[in-house]
């Protein structure tokens, strides 16, 4: 079955001190790996993405790009689907998230689905950022599935290591992943069968 070979890339958007997003990213990684999927985590603090000056797709000769950028592009192109874990900064998406994803062109994301996971320390769960992510991801070519997994009071929902502290976490992640894996498998099968339009 095609879905057994799916590869996922998780983007973690927050870099601010005391960020809660890492526990969310760990949780989503664990949930995907429990279904035997391969997962790559893109963390702007670990990968040290600089402010965007030259995107990977603007290098005429890709071998002239920094090695870390070449490596990230290879992983993105290998992915079948994306999970975007985002905080809400001033009712919008974190600048580190847009900066990280903008380092790579639409062709790295196109014809693959995405899933949106937002969180907040309050009761809103970051849904205003999710609405902006729908547009952002759509323009990149990785349309988001209909479900949005929003996590209110994230500090009460997950441990630092990403272990769930309530039933909503398992059911909410499960619903999103089920939609995402269906779309990812369908789109992978079609990419393999007919290729990607030029």
Image (cartoon, rainbow, N blue to C red):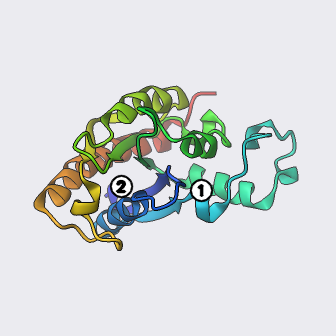
- Between the C-alphas of marks 2 and 1, the distance is 30 Å
Vertical comparison of 132 with 16: above or below:
above
Depth check: give the residue in front, 7 or 65: 65
Image quadrant occupied by the C terminus: top right
| Image quadrant where residue 140 sits | top right
Q: Residues within 10 Å of mark 2 (few under 14, many from 20)?
A: few
Element type where label 1 sits in the image:
helix
Vertical comparison of 42 with 119: above or below:
below
Depth check: give the residue in front, 78 or 73: 73
Q: Nearer the viewer, mark 2 or mark 1?
A: 1
Give the x, y percent position of residue 167: 11, 61
Which residue is denoted by mark 1 in the rendering?
Answer: 44
Give the x, y percent position of residue 8: 44, 56
Vertical comparison of 177 with 166: above or below:
above
Give the x, y percent position of residue 119: 32, 48
Which residue is denoted by mark 2 in the rendering?
Answer: 2
Element type where label 2 sits in the image:
helix
Depth check: give the residue in front, 16 or 168: 16
| Image quadrant where residue 1 sits | bottom left
Residue at x-position 51% and y-position 59%: 17
Residue at x-position 80% and y-position 36%: 58
Callouts 2 and 1 close, C-beta under 8 Å:
no
**Which comes before the other along the chain, label 2 or label 1?**
2
């Amino acid at each position: 079955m095609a879905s057994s070979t799916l590869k996922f890339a998780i983007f973690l958007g927050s870099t601010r001190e005391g960020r809660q997003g890492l526990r969310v990213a760990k949780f989503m990684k664990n949930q995907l790996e429990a279904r035997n999927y391969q997962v790559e985590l893109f963390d702007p603090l670990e990968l040290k993405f600089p402010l965007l000056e030259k995107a990977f797709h603007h290098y005429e000769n890709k071998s002239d790009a920094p090695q870390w950028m070449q490596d990230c592009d290879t992983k993105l192109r290998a992915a079948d689907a994306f999970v975007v874990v985002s905080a809400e900064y001033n009712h919008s998406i974190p600048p580190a998230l847009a900066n990280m994803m903008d380092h790579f062109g639409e062709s790295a994301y196109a014809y693959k689905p995405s899933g949106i996971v937002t969180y907040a320390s309050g009761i809103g769960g970051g849904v205003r950022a999710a609405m902006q992510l729908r547009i952002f991801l759509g323009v990149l070519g990785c349309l988001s599935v209909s479900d949005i997994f929003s996590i209110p009071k994230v500090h009460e929902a997950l441990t630092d290591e990403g272990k769930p502290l309530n039933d909503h976490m398992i059911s909410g992640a499960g619903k999103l992943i089920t939609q995402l894996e269906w779309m990812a498998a369908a789109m992978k099968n079609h990419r393999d069968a007919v290729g990607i339009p030029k």
